[in-house]
Image (cartoon, rainbow, N blue to C red):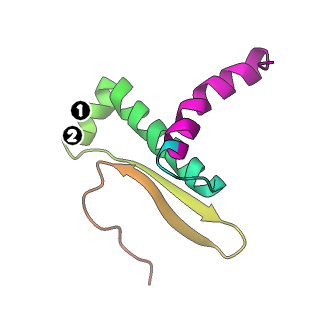
Amino acid sequence: MAPAGYCRDVVERVTPSVLAARAAGRVEPEEILAEHIRQTVDLLVDRSRVLAERVAAGQAAVVVLCYRLADGSAQLVASRGLDAAMPTAS
């Protein structure tokens, strides 16, 4: 039985990412989450003309980092419009 209301909406939005990750052989929760994040970034840029134009012109970027509270590290998960290497903190 499918969930109702808001939960159903969330499940419907996440399911394509889960299926795409599994089809690509990704089964770990972190891999599935990363696939969902990549698809969400693509949707943001694809569905917003203004954002897409700014990204294409090099005036904006969409960047997603995963922050690990336990050790204070951050890892780049996905980006659109970020062509240059990110500077490192010294």
User: To which residue does mark 2 refer?
Assistant: 56
- Which numbered marker is on residue 22? none
In-front residue for pair 54/1: 1
Span highlighted in magenta in the image: 1-22
Closer to the camera in the image, 40 or 74: 40
Q: Is residue 43 left or right of residue 26?
A: left
Q: Quadrant of residue 46?
A: top left
Q: Indicate whether 61 appears above or below 66.
A: above
Q: Where does residue 47 sit, x and y in percent of width and height?
A: 37, 24
Across and down, in percent, residue 20 comes to: 49, 39
Please say whether residue 36 is one of the residues in the magenta stretch: no
Q: What residue do we see at 61% from left, 63% from top?
A: 67
Identified at 65% across, 53% down, the residue is 29
Give me the disc on residue 53. 1
Residue 23 vs 69, above or below: the answer is: above
Label 2 secondary element: helix
User: Marks 1 and 2, how far apart in space?
Assistant: 5 Å
Residue 38 drawn at (x, y percent): 45, 45
Q: Left or right: 39 with respect to 22?
A: left
User: Please, which residue is most extreme toward the top here?
Assistant: 5
Q: In the rendered image of this protein, does residue 59 appear above or below residue 11?
A: below
Q: Which three-letter amino acid code belongs to the residue tagged 2?
A: Ala
Question: Percent position (x, y) of residue 2?
Answer: 77, 19
The kind of secondary structure element at disc 1 is helix
13 in magenta:
yes
Direction from residue 71 to residue 24 in the image, left or right: left
Label 2 neighbour load within 10 Å: few <14, some 14-19, many 20+: some
